[in-house]
Amino acid sequence: MIKINNLHKSFGKNQILKGLDLQISKGGIIAILGPNGSGKTTLIKAILGMVLPESGTILIDEHNIKKGSSYREQIDYLPQLANFPNNLKLKELLRMIKDLRSRESSKDQELINLFELTPYLNKKLGHLSGGTRQKVNLVLALMYDSPLIILDEPTSGLDPVSLLHLKELLLQEKQAGKTILLSSHITSFVEEMADELVFLLEGKIYFQGSIEQLKQQSKQSNFERAIASILEQ
């Protein structure tokens, strides 16, 4: 599904990705973890073509992303911070996104109902709370039937009921054969949802494997302690 070879990216004198190599197979939920500044968001944005690396290759389904942007049509993305136009109503934003995409959404109304957003359709986005804006963010990220889903901190601001809905949605997408990349600081969410971990440290892949494999490697029975043991080295 995703093959990355010798990826380098710097911002000024700050080298973020240092020859990163990564392979992700099709299907399942993969959590991208690492401390602040490890390169998680830069990696995600490089896959999306939003950040241009100095060197290295990124292949998605054998397509080199440098050779065209059409591959993005097969990706759904939830950014960590959604900067919506405050003067737009929610229904206007949904219509705008539909106009920008080349295919129709079949799940937008289902998601609106699930996250109880119908009362907000005629409200301006600038008047919505942070938690409601995150639900809108999730609707936009999941309303298209794309094989690759990338979620950056998807649980931010969600109430317990909405978090439960998110978990159920991700399991449904996984069962449908989707590949889901997610970045989260909530270790309990990662432990419950992830089939595989990719742990970044200082711009390189420090670990890739299952949670149980990480526990064995770190000689820790607790997931949080296994993560902490990496950071304390």
Image (cartoon, grey):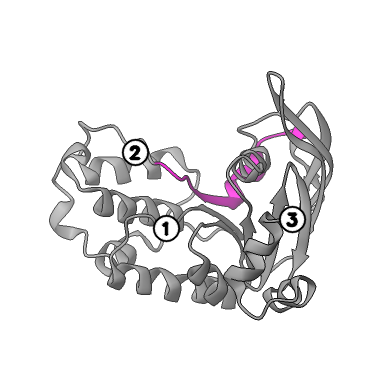
Q: Do we see residue 192 in this rendering?
A: yes
**For mark 3, what is the residue?**
233
Element type where label 2 sits in the image: helix
Q: Amino acid at mark 2?
A: Met
Up/down of 169 relative to 128, above or below: below
SS label for mark 3: loop
The quadrant the C terminus occupies is: bottom right
Using a 10 Å C-alpha cutoff, classify the residue at mark 3 as few (fewer than 14 neighbours), some (14 to 19) or many (20 or more): few
* Mark number, residue 143: 1
- Residue in the foreground of this view, choosing between 14 and 115: 14
Q: Which residue is labeled 2 in the image?
A: 96
Give x and y (percent) for residue 228. Answer: 63, 62
Q: Residues within 10 Å of mark 2 (few under 14, many from 20)?
A: few
**On the picture, is 190 further left or further right than 206?**
left
Element type where label 1 sits in the image: loop
Q: Nearer the viewer, residue 119 or 19?
A: 19
> Is-magenta flag for residue 69?
yes
